[in-house]
Amino acid sequence: MVIQNFKDPTVFMERDTFLSKFLRKLSIQLNYIPGGSTKIRKIFGFLSWLGVVEVALLCSRDSVLIFLDDDSDYIYIFGDFAAPAGKFRKQATLIFLLYLYGSLYSAIYLVRTQKSPKYQVWIKMFKAYDNRSWLNQKAELHRLYWLTTRIELIYSISITISLIFLSAVLTITFPPRFIHYTLAHQLLNIHGGYNSCSYWGISYLLFPSYGYLLGQRLDKISHNLNKCLEQINSNYCVRHQIKSTTIRIGNIKSVTPRKLINQLTKQLKQLHNACLFWSRISEPTFLISFINQALLLYLIFFVPMSTGFRCFLAVLGIFNFISGQCCHFFAGIYTQKKIDNCIKTALKLGYSQIDWRTRFTVLSVLEAVQERKFFTIFNAIEFCSEHYCLVLLEGVSLLMLMIATYGSRN
């Protein structure tokens, strides 16, 4: 659908976009995101499919490793990352396995979005990053663009260094007779682990930017609606003329109340379809990070293991908490406030001196969206302050329960 708006589809596809470059650094290629030459798209399309296969292989391998005895030779042959955990290796393996399953779900879901247009609407918001002239004029937008790209760069570099370092340490500490098998599987661990982190991180790396861009667009609509209300309330035009009268906003732009409502309606429709994508892609991230948070707390505080591996799990726990239980909620809370503010302003316009057709349109639209929470997980957990506090209390309660259980055993 997007390509049809251009006279030369080839030029359109070869022009790099923010999303195409962003996902390419994560070795992900989606056919509905334009950008890059045909050759580059084929290469990264192959790498993307290879990544899905590697994540599936790692899932299968760890599903077997978790049932093996701690002294089994296959732990060293397959280069199990959880081997330094000692007798609690199975619990550590379970943490990595859950991450892999979450990544595999995200990878398969992204592949499915290529066949369903309603799951592709989310990319429209990021077109703001491709408008260089507008990007340079908006200081806040430029800072967000810079921050998003730098976070992705740091994320890519950090997971690469971590995987290489951990693989090197395991290769050195494993028995020498398994060195050939270990080296071969460590290559799979590094490349497959990078792809797993890429699919795992796509939601919390992009969703905050999406939320901010949407909030800015709704702020603009809300500002125009307020200007419209001010001029209507100051008797700028009589009631029977408002239907066709234009209201000047700023020095240049002039709109009608109905046009403003149509803009809001169009934005809310896009938001509804985009939420279908964000909710589905965020569900495994939240669920698995919540489960792993309990397992990580248990291993870090209550299990004897080497200091180096404990520090590694501590860093993983911090990353787990920020990525799975902070980014989505903070961005969702900000965006939902902008949505509510825009809806309240539109409701005021609905009860002002406007023609009955525009009023009917306003009230019909707002009836469907008023008090609605757009961003949810499993259609139950909302991205709001109250539910975020409940999630934190659940985590604290779980930690207290583990402390009580550990104390009773000792």
Image (spheres, helix red, strand yellow):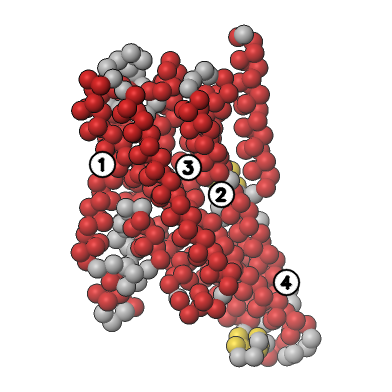
C-alpha gap between disc 3 and disc 2: 11 Å
Query: Which numbered disc, 2 or 4, marks the residue that appears first in the sequence?
Result: 2
The residue labelled by disc 4 is 348
| Visible residue check, residue 278 | no
Name the residue at 66% across, 87% down.
250
C-alpha gap between disc 2 and disc 4: 32 Å
Against 46, is 307 above or below?
A: above
Please give the count of numbered marks on the rendered protein.
4
Q: Position of residue 357 (x, y in %)?
A: 62, 79
Q: Quadrant of residue 14?
A: bottom left
Name the residue at 33% across, 33% down.
168
Q: Secondary structure at mark 1?
A: helix
The residue labelled by disc 2 is 327
Q: Secondary structure at mark 4?
A: helix
Q: Looking at the image, is mark 3 or mark 2 nearer the viewer?
A: 2
Q: Looking at the image, is mark 2 or mark 4 nearer the viewer?
A: 2
Q: Residue furthest top?
A: 410
| Visible residue check, residue 51 | yes
The residue labelled by disc 3 is 285
Q: Residues within 10 Å of mark 2 (few under 14, many from 20)?
A: some
Query: Which numbered disc, 3 or 2, marks the residue that appears first in the sequence?
Result: 3
Query: Which numbered disc, 4 or 3, marks the residue that appears first in the sequence?
Result: 3
Q: Residues within 10 Å of mark 3 (few under 14, many from 20)?
A: many
